[in-house]
Amino acid sequence: MDIPYKIIEDEMIIQLPQRVEKEDSLKFERELYCIIKDGSNYKTFFDAENLDYISTAGLMVIKRLRLEFGNLKMINCKPELLKFLKENGYSELV
């Protein structure tokens, strides 16, 4: 899993993959952790534009990283993902 990201002024935007399966969550977490740790001076956003599926394990990764690094947010969520996040206690991510 190679997660792309870009830095624009004082923001880092991490492009989430199309799918994050439960089996991928450990690798997903390690990669995101390294990216965010190296860019800790930036406001960080997870771009969910291409995200079609994320397992609960994947969401827990994002939630843990948010707890450790601060106010990380998901942007460009599709309506069905936004609804799922809000209905299942992940509204702080958006």
Image (tube, rainbow, N blue to C red):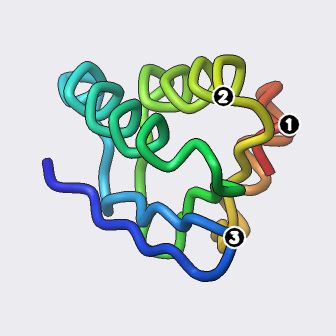
Q: Residues within 10 Å of mark 3 (few under 14, many from 20)?
A: few
Residue 29: percent from left, percent from top: 35, 27
Q: Are marks 3 and 2 in contact (CB under 8 Å)?
A: no
The image's mark for residue 10 is 3
Q: Amino acid at mark 3?
A: Asp
* Vertical relation: 23 (above or below) 78: above
Mark 1 highlights which residue?
Answer: 92
Q: Which of the 4 quarters of the picture holds residue 57?
A: top left
Q: Is residue 42 shown left or right of residue 83?
A: left
Q: Are marks 3 and 1 in contact (CB under 8 Å)?
A: no
Q: Secondary structure at mark 2?
A: helix
Residue 15: percent from left, percent from top: 42, 66
Residue at position x 71%, y 44% in the image: 72
Furthest residue to the front?
41
What is the spatial separation of the Cα atoms under label 1 and label 2, in whole angstroms?
A: 14 Å
The image's mark for residue 9 is none
- Pick whichever of labels 3 and 2 is earlier in the sequence: 3
Mark 2 highlights which residue?
Answer: 69
Q: Amino acid at mark 1?
A: Glu
Residue at position x 85%, y 39% in the image: 91
Residue at position x 59%, y 18% in the image: 64
Q: Secondary structure at mark 3?
A: loop
> Which mark lies nearer to you, 3 or 2?
3
> Which mark lies nearer to you, 1 or 2?
2
* Vertical relation: 39 (above or below) 15: above
Q: Amino acid at mark 2?
A: Phe
